[in-house]
C-alpha cells in the first residue's frame, strides 16, 4: 500500500465525511504482471487497512442504493450564522 492510499483512508475516517473509491484495472491483478505492474499486493494491503480501520465496504447493490438515496435528498432553506458557527437547513427528499 502506498503512503498516499493510507493517508486518504486515514483522513477519510478521522476527519472527513467522505468516500474513498479505489480504481484499478483488473488486467493488472493477474500473474504474470502486465508491464511489470502487479496490483494485488497494493490492493490486498489497502483492503486490509480499510478493514482494520473499520471502513464500510458495501457491495455493488448496497452502493447503488446509497447513491440513489443520496441523490434524492436536497438541502433547502440553508442559513449560516457565522457568529454562532451554526448551520440550519431543511432536508427534502425527492421521489422519482
Image (cartoon, helix red, strand yellow):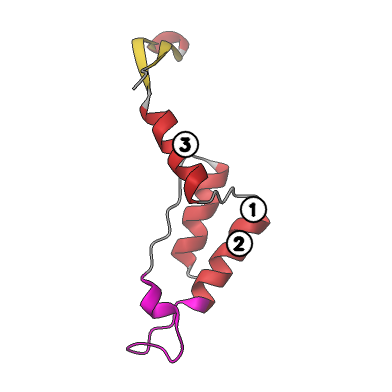
Looking at the rendered structure, which numbered label has been put on residue 49? 2
Please say if 15 is above or below 23. Answer: above
Q: Is residue 53 left or right of residue 21?
A: right
Residue bearing mark 1:
53
Residue nearest the viewer, comparing 90 with 72 = 72
Q: Quadrant of the C terminus?
A: top left
Magenta part of the protein: which range?
25-40
Q: Quadrant of residue 68?
A: top left
For mark 3, give the secondary structure.
helix
Residue 80, percent across and down?
Answer: 37, 12
Residue 8, percent across and down?
Answer: 47, 54
Q: Are marks 1 and 2 in contact (CB under 8 Å)?
A: yes
| Circle nearer the N terminus (3, 1) | 1
Q: Is residue 76 magenta?
A: no
Please say if 17 is above or below 20. Answer: above
Q: Is residue 34 magenta?
A: yes
- Going 55% across and 52% down the picture, which residue do you hit? 10
Between tags 3 and 1, which lies in front? Answer: 3
Looking at the rendered structure, which numbered label has been put on residue 36? none
Looking at the rendered structure, which numbered label has been put on residue 66? 3
Distance CA(mark 3)–CA(mark 2): 23 Å
- Going 44% across and 29% down the picture, which residue do you hit? 69
Q: Are marks 3 and 1 in contact (CB under 8 Å)?
A: no
Q: Is residue 86 left or right of residue 55?
A: left
For mark 2, give the secondary structure.
helix
- Going 48% across and 66% down the picture, which residue do you hit? 3
Amino acid at each position: 500500500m502506498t503512503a498516499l492510499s493510507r493517508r486518504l483512508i486515514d483522513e477519510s475516517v478521522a476527519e472527513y465525511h467522505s468516500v474513498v473509491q479505489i480504481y484499478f484495472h483488473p488486467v493488472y491483478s493477474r500473474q504474470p504482471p502486465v508491464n511489470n505492474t502487479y496490483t494485488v499486493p497494493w490492493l490486498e494491503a489497502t483492503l486490509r487497512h480499510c478493514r482494520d480501520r473499520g471502513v464500510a465496504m458495501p457491495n455493488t447493490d448496497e452502493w447503488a442504493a446509497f447513491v440513489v438515496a443520496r441523490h434524492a435528498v436536497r438541502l433547502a432553506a440553508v442559513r449560516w450564522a457565522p457568529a454562532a458557527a451554526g448551520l440550519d437547513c431543511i432536508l427534502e427528499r425527492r421521489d422519482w
